[in-house]
Image (cartoon, rainbow, N blue to C red):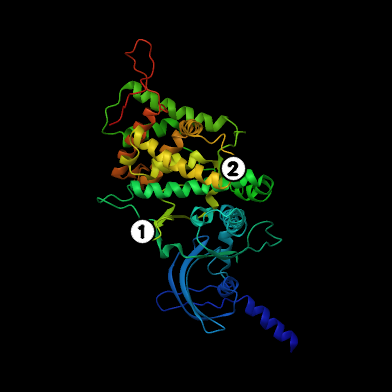
Amino acid sequence: MLRRFRRFINRRRNVSPLYCSSPDENYHMIHMQLLQFIEKSVGDHVYLVGEELIEATGPDVFPHTFQIRITVNTDQGLPLHFNLFVKILIADQCDLAQRERAYMRLDVLINLKKEIQMYSEVIPKIAKFQKLRMINTDCRVSNLFEKCFGTRISIEPRLPKLPDYSSAILLSNPHEKYTFQACETEGSRNNGFTYDTTILILRDMAYFHAGTLAMRLKKKALFLRTIVPILNLEVKEYEQAPPVEMLFKELISYGLRDLQLSDDQRVAIRDSLQLSRLYNRFVREETDQTWYALSYSRYSMSYIMTKQTWEDATNPSKLIDLHRVGFDHCCKDLANFIFTSVRPESFNGQWSFSNLLHEYLYEFLRTLRSHRVPMGQYTWDNFRAEFHAVGAKMLADIFMNIRTSFCRNYKGNEDPILSNEYRKRIAAALNTMTIFQWIKVFDSNSANGSPDSDLIVFD
């Protein structure tokens, strides 16, 4: 009898207390003990009262995600309501074929493991570091991420150091207050963030960079031992980058179709693309990490969630898909964000672009001071020099990211279908890059052939 009771208890621990199935959608989850996450968060035993599935990905999408509202009662009869975002490796864990397909994707397993460790280890360590230094709550790194109710990762001997099928992340649902559809105006989809929203996002980015840079400097041993290995956890992407000639032809064919370019201008663009590609291919990792901190490889409007209303506007943005977080130069995030995600009229021109840099650096330096970081190396002149040096090496990456952001689909011949905003943004980017001399255009009629620093080529 006792043995039978133990088997029953063990079986109950492997069955989800949440079950959702309707005639319209046959949705179910096994082994997802969501109530255990919630009990740990509230510190009390809870009873499920009701649940409502809001949205879920298809069963063949790995990892599987869904949004769900649940209502529970505590032992004291207190009703609690939760709007949750759940990410789990496999939706139906009884489906062996589905499980097999998931385990064939090494990138899925590694990315999920990294994201779980970001929520369970990296963010709590940074939060503790800033709390002990009494950093203003509005300026903390943790504001950029949704509240995590819990994570689970089980390591099986047959898959050493990889998550098993029940691994999961449970978050407060960011889709309740935030959206990716924050920049649709004038009939143009995703034409970029307005100036006011851009400033708020730049402040968040500065908190993200400066707060983690301060931890790297103040707690170097802890940072290198416990955080950097998680940041470096990734699967090498083998997608081949397009040759420079192909990228150059695409810019001319699609991005600059309506502009009359001289031969000098064409040569300058092609040479600048080639130099940036050669740098990334042959130059080794820099040893000077003065401006290195946590970074987000896709800091752009496609991956930034902003508030639907202006309530609590001090924290307007959230980052998800934390497997994209890495350790890199702050200016890479900054350059990528401005060129891909800010409306062109807000950065097209030296004054407007420099104003965005000043807004970012002001919050960056203020955050470093609040952490009592020595400020000797962190000046406007040094920052501006770093930004231009990094930006000139990113030309090819910036143009590829712009294409990715504004490509709606592909034609049968694999030519991209690009929005009208693409050409407008490419022209503004090239105009700004020429002003900054990231692209050096030589006047063939000049006696000395020197670049004209005041030349604005693209109108």
> Regarding mark 1 in the picture, which secondary structure is present there?
loop
Q: Amino acid at mark 1?
A: Trp
According to the picture, the residue beneath numbered tag 1 turns out to be 310
The image shows residue 247 at horizontal and vertical percentages of 41, 34
Q: Nearer the viewer, residue 152 or 334?
A: 334
Q: Quadrant of the N terminus?
A: bottom right
Q: Which quadrant holds the C terminus?
A: top left
Does residue 333 lie above or below 66 as drawn? above
Relative depth, front residue between 438 and 330: 330
Q: Which mark is residue 373?
A: 2
Residues at marks 1 and 2, CA–CA distance in whole angstroms: 32 Å
Q: Earlier in the sequence, mark 1 or mark 2?
A: 1
Please state which of residues 407 and 384 is positioned toward the viewer in this rendering: 384
Q: Residue 401: x, y in percent? A: 42, 42
Left of 41 or right of it: where is 434? left
Is 141 placed left or right of 349 in the picture?
A: right
Rendered image quadrant of residue 30: bottom right
Residue 176 lies in quadrant: bottom left
Q: Alpha-carbon neighbours of circle 1 within 10 Å: few (<14), some, or many (≥20)?
A: few
